[in-house]
Amino acid sequence: MTCRGRFVVIEGGDGVGKTTQSRLLAARLGARLTREPGGTDLGEQIRSVLLDPHAGDVHPMAELLLMVAARAQHVNSVIEPALESGVDVVCDRFSGSTLAYQGYGRGLPLEDVAAACALGSLGLVPDVTVLLDAPLPALAGRRPRGAGSEAPDRIERAGERFHERVRAGFLELGRQDGWVVVDASGEVDDVARDVCAAVAGVLGRCGPPVRSDPIVSSGAPCRPVAPEPGR
Ligand code: TMP
């Protein structure tokens, strides 16, 4: 019998190192790595529109609906099929980002944002959400601004007060069941170790039915990445 895969989400503000940590965690878990907004052809097109600095004045409600439209496509055609076939999924952002950015950040009523998220996620709830948190000044130096084509996108440009509201919103969300907050202000390897411990702490029990995969059934779901040659 195939056990349903586990759905792990990494959340956090812009520049907190989510993408790197998502990649490292997916490698350790042998999980499928994906991201939001994006993850499908439609989702990536919606992403380009949403992040385009020349998109002009985008109403927060339009922003919200586009985010959850991309999510519905993503859940239906990528995430659910992977989980159903027993593959773990690590997703760089999910509904938590919508609550933090469109709710706490843009100021849309949280109950409206939550309702839109329930629709867009097709009812899918993460097994665990890891919130990477660091103070804004610690993030400034890490943003890939100005590097090649990596000029700040439309949402990164929203200003410091917006991003402070987003961070405060995330910390509020991080108090909920199913969330674990990890201090992301340290070195990449230290943060990766803490993310792994956080995920193992929640998913250590796979729950019945247990997969025959010895790594999962041994209660050690964070599989070490194979050492690089020469290390
Ligand atoms: P990133 O994935 O490179 O961090 O960029 C995605 C941007 O989109 C980031 O600024 C957060 C934002 N975002 C929202 O505002 N709402 C959402 O629901 C999601 C998934 C992302």
Image (cartoon, rainbow, N blue to C red):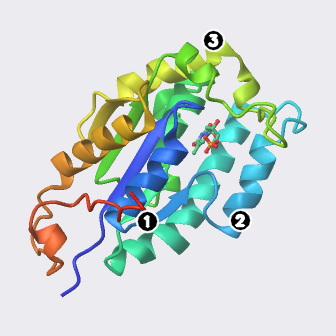
| SS for callout 3 | helix
Instruction: Please tell me how crowded label 3 is: few (under 14), some (14-19), or many (20+) other residues with Cα within 10 Å.
Output: few
Image position of 96 with respect to 207: above or below: above
Instruction: Please tell me how crowded label 2 is: few (under 14), some (14-19), or many (20+) other residues with Cα within 10 Å.
Output: some
**Identity, as a three-letter code, of the amino acid under mark 1:** Pro
User: Which-is-in-front pick, marks 1 and 2?
Assistant: 1
Q: For the C terminus, give its image quadrant.
A: bottom left
Residue at 70 percent of width and 34 percent of height:
144
In the shown orientation, is residue 183 left or right of residue 164?
left
Instruction: Please tell me how crowded label 1 is: few (under 14), some (14-19), or many (20+) other residues with Cα within 10 Å.
Output: few
Residue 118 visible within the image: no
Residue 122 location (% of width, % of height): 46, 61
Residue 139 location (% of width, % of height): 57, 23
Q: Separation of disc 2 and disc 3 at Cα?
A: 31 Å
**Identity, as a three-letter code, of the amino acid under mark 3:** Arg
Image position of 124 with respect to 82: above or below: above
Residue at 43 percent of width and 45 percent of height:
10
Q: Earlier in the sequence, mark 1 or mark 2?
A: 2
Labelled disc at residue 161: 3
Q: Which residue lies under the disc numbered 1?
A: 229
Q: Earlier in the sequence, mark 2 or mark 3?
A: 2
Q: Separation of disc 1 and disc 2 at Cα?
A: 38 Å
